[in-house]
Image (cartoon, rainbow, N blue to C red):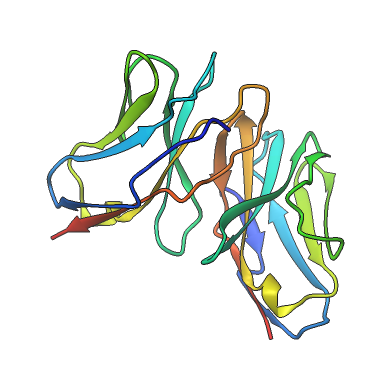
Amino acid sequence: DAKTTQPPSMDCAEGRAANLPCNHSTISGNEYVYWYRQIHSQGPQYIIHGLKNNETNEMASLIITEDRKSSTLILPHATLRDTAVYYCIVPRNRDDKIIFGKGTRLHILP
Amino acid sequence: DAGVIQSPRHEVTEMGQEVTLRCKPISGHDYLFWYRQTMMRGLELLIYFNNNVPIDDSGMPEDRFSAKMPNASFSTLKIQPSEPRDSAVYFCASSQSRSVAYFGPGTRLTVT
């Protein structure tokens, strides 16, 4: 997988936007950026993915820089239920494996 | 849709015993993944299947681990003999399209 770098932890106040960064400077070709999260004691949950353009769904928004070397996952109005580990993944284009790194542990503060 | 179903949810066994974990993927999904999660090593991909065929088992730790997918709706992960270091949460996931996977609730395995 293209190497991704995420901060180990972040805090965000409840009701505010949570902005989670990811660096993937070695991304190449048509490799997509995927985001998953894992709430404590649950299986990982797919959030969103994108290639070049910004993407939005009911869970989050994904902003990818023009050079595609970094991206930001935005949770627009964070709630306590958004406390989780968030993983940014860039699978190799020719591969189907989903490899998880250490992710960012997001704490939502009441 | 019930999602990915795993059984049992919890398993406690003694060292040396055989352990079989089961997974029913989401209907219509072509990919099935087995992961293991521990505090020390995080989420590790053990093996994945495409159309019931094992594609990559490079993550399987050793010969004590084996996985099968006899049909599109069922897969097993077997550990024989089990050891205390196999204690972990084992997740099964299935996918219809590349890299968008849906995970089951996991099986928490404790080997004493």
Q: Is residue B7 above or below residue B55?
A: below
Q: Quadrant of the C terminus of chain B?
A: bottom right
Furthest-front residue in this view = A26
Observer-nearest of A16 and B106: A16
Residue nearer the viewer, B64 or A4: A4
Q: Quadrant of residue A55?
A: top left
- Position in image of residue B73 (x %, y %): 75, 45
Location of the N terminus of chain B by quadrant is top right
- Left or right: residue A2 compared with residue B63: left
Looking at the image, how many numbered discs can be counted on the residues? 0
Q: Residue at x 46, y 36 (%)?
A: A4
Query: Where A85 falls versus A48 (above or below)?
Result: below
Q: Residue at x 61, y 69 (%)?
A: B88
> Is residue A17 toward the left or the right of residue A43 in the image?
left
- Measured as percent of width and height from the top left, residue A60 is found at 30, 34
Residue B79 percent across, percent down from the top left:
80, 67
In the rendered image, is residue B37 in sight? Answer: yes
Looking at the image, residue B19 sits to the left or right of residue A94; the answer is: right
Residue B1 appears in view:
no
**Residue visible at 78% across and 57% down in the picture:** B76
User: Which residue corresponds to the image point at 83% horizontal and 44% vertical from the top-left?
Assistant: B71
Q: Residue B45 at x, y = what percent?
A: 65, 49
Q: Nearer the viewer, residue A101 or A79?
A: A101
Is residue B28 positioned above or below A110 on the image? above
